[in-house]
Image (tube, rainbow, N blue to C red):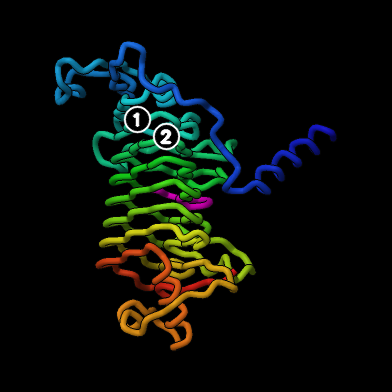
Amino acid sequence: MLCGLLKMWEDLRLRVHGPFFPRILRRRKGKREFGKTITHIVAKVMTTEMIKDLSSDTLLQQHDDLDLALDNCYSGDTVIIFPGEYQAANLALLTDDIIIKGVGKREEIMITSEPSRDSFVVSKADNVKLMHLSLIQQGTVDGIVVVESGHMTLENCILKCEGTGVCVLTGATLTITDSEITGAQGAGVELYPGSTAILERNEIHHCNNLRTSDSSKSTLGGVNMKVLPAPKLKMTNNHIYSNKGYGVSILQPTEQFFIVTEEALNKRAASGDKKDDKMLFKVMQNLNLEMNNNKIEANVKGDIRIVTS
């Protein structure tokens, strides 16, 4: 019984600390002593065909386990993953500047989370990049990707969420291009105060599948921003559709006030009555928010909206 109570307390402690409680306690390794970088090949068997496009002086290590490859990485290394299904607890411990990329169709490089763990992909590296692969969330309670600090890039990836979507914490930066995010219980992309995100040519759809009577949570859909202090968001050529909340929601305290000019109101205002339009513009003027050529449609609550906390 005592063990059960301790486990319940530990779970509660993690939830109370929420997104600002550090998930990564591992120290950064940095570069190898001899200064060389290694390309790690993740496949059951390595053939000459797999490495024909690499330069002749590339240092290689072959692994049949993604976790082992990540455990052997130092800053500057590259992990190349060939088609298959993988799991890797070390994806929740990214501290070094590495590139992780799939070879082949992104649908065929499937990385699934371990249901027994809280986190799936968590980074505090200065610059880490994931490319050409699918992340499939199964049972983890944290965001499918959490950028705790530093800069993470997701390029040409599929993110199939089962819990929370992508979370960018205070001071962290995220770039997502040519990717797809679907199935999140809340927003597909959640920006915490003081974070930065660049979203280009992505599809974000069928998010906010959370069954709740909490009206503030029911508004979450494609992208959600929390505005004290204001995050920075640049969105270009994204398609945000079929989310149960709004396409883009902006969360702000009720006591916050902003200055508005009528000229930009007509350009940026979302659907709704005139009072809501003015408030929306006030918030957007205060934000570092740039939106160009995005297609936001068929979201249950609407396309873009301010939500007061």
Q: Secondary structure at mark 1?
A: loop
Q: Position of residue 241 (x, y in %)?
A: 37, 67
Spot the residue most to the bottom: 274
Q: Quadrant of the N terminus?
A: top right
| Residue 266: image location, x then y, percent | 32, 83
Residue 39: image x %, image y %? 28, 22
Q: Residue 50's spot in the image, x, y percent?
A: 21, 24
Main secondary structure along the magenta-highlighted residues = strand
Alpha carbon distance from label 1 to label 2:
8 Å
Q: Which residue is mark 1?
A: 98
- The C terminus lies in which quarter of the figure? bottom right
Residue 299: tell me if it is visible. no
* Residue sticking out furthest to the front: 259
Q: Is residue 178 left or right of residue 307?
A: left
Q: Is residue 303 magenta?
A: no
The one of 216 and 95 positioned closer to us in this rendering: 95
53 displayed left or right of 211: left
Helix, strand or loop status at disc 2: loop
Q: Which residues are magenta?
A: 159-166
Q: Which mark is in front, 1 or 2?
A: 2
Hey, what amino acid is under mark 1? Ile
Query: Quick one: label 1, few (<14), some, or many (20+) residues within 10 Å?
Result: many
Q: Amino acid at mark 2?
A: Ala
Residue 272 shows up from this direction: yes
Nearer the observer, 219 or 42: 219
> Which label belongs to residue 125?
2
Residue plotted at (27% across, 16% down): 60
Q: Residue at x 36, y 31 (%)?
A: 97
Asked if 169 appears above or below 22 in the picture, the reply is below
Q: Is residue 161 magenta?
A: yes
- Asked if 301 appears above or below 229 in the picture, the reply is below
When the figure is inspected, residue 11 is found, relative to residue 308, above or below; the finding is: above
